[in-house]
Image (spheres, rainbow, N blue to C red):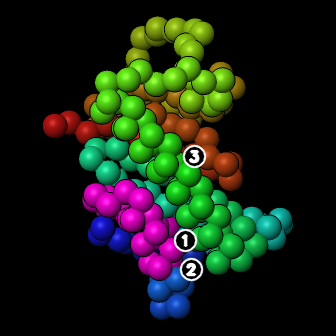
Amino acid sequence: MKLRIIGKNKEISPEVSLYLEKKLRKLDRHLPNIFEGVVEISQEMTKDPEKRYVVQITLTHSGTVLRDEQRAADIHSAIDSAVDVMDRRIERYKGKLYRKGRGEKPLPSKGPEEIEIVREKRFLLTSLSVEQAVEQMELLGHDFFLFINAETGLYSLVYRRRGGNYGLIESELP
């Protein structure tokens, strides 16, 4: 697995890098063909000290992206928590692959994996700037807004992040 460790607002010490690599080797044993792993570690100055360190793990396996983000009071707890949750996600993913490979339909479940579409909407996408899209999202009271970016001409999505900031996702042309 190619592993990239990125520090945001924080310098990552060699000790933390070694600890993280040791923990992530466990994931590689469960799912050996992980192509790439990206770990972002940041430190936020929040009022709640229990959410000071943020560890985000993103793994790529055969075109599937598995992602998790955890927060904790210290960096080691955040890493442990993120790796534990990612381990459970890998097991669930492997279970789906196993059932699919055997030609079985997944068992109906009453948990969060059950998908039921209860509403469909269609609307005309308009060409807007990113700022206009954020304003429109706020006016509608939504957490995300899909639009065509006036500057790039690409399908784009703005969304509200947990900290109150905004994110932008843009499509890519092949």
Separation (CA) of disc 1 from disc 2: 7 Å
* Residue 166, numbered circle: 3
Quick one: label 1, few (<14), some, or many (20+) residues within 10 Å?
Answer: many
6 or 35: nearer the eye? 35
Quarter holding the C terminus is: top left
- The region drawn magenta spans 20-40
66 or 53: nearer the eye? 66
Q: Is residue 83 above or below residue 114?
A: below
Quick one: label 3, few (<14), some, or many (20+) residues within 10 Å?
Answer: few
Q: Is residue 139 left or right of residue 13?
A: right
73 or 46: nearer the eye? 73
Q: Nearer the viewer, mark 3 or mark 2?
A: 2
Separation (CA) of disc 1 from disc 3: 19 Å
Dot 1 or dot 2, earlier in sequence: 2
What residue type is disc 2 on? Lys
Separation (CA) of disc 3 from disc 2: 21 Å
The residue singled out by tag 1 in the image is 41
Q: Secondary structure at mark 1?
A: strand
Quarter holding the N terminus is: bottom left
Dot 3 or dot 2, earlier in sequence: 2
Q: Is residue 103 left or right of residue 168?
A: left
Can you give x and y, in whole percent of width and height, for residue 60 in the image?
34, 53
* Residue 10, numbered circle: 2
Visible residue check, residue 53 = no
- What residue appears at the point 53 percent right and 56 percent down from the top-left corner? 86
Can you give x and y, in whole percent of width and height, for residue 83 in the image?
55, 64
Asked if disc 1 and disc 2 are in contact, CB closer than 8 Å, the reply is yes
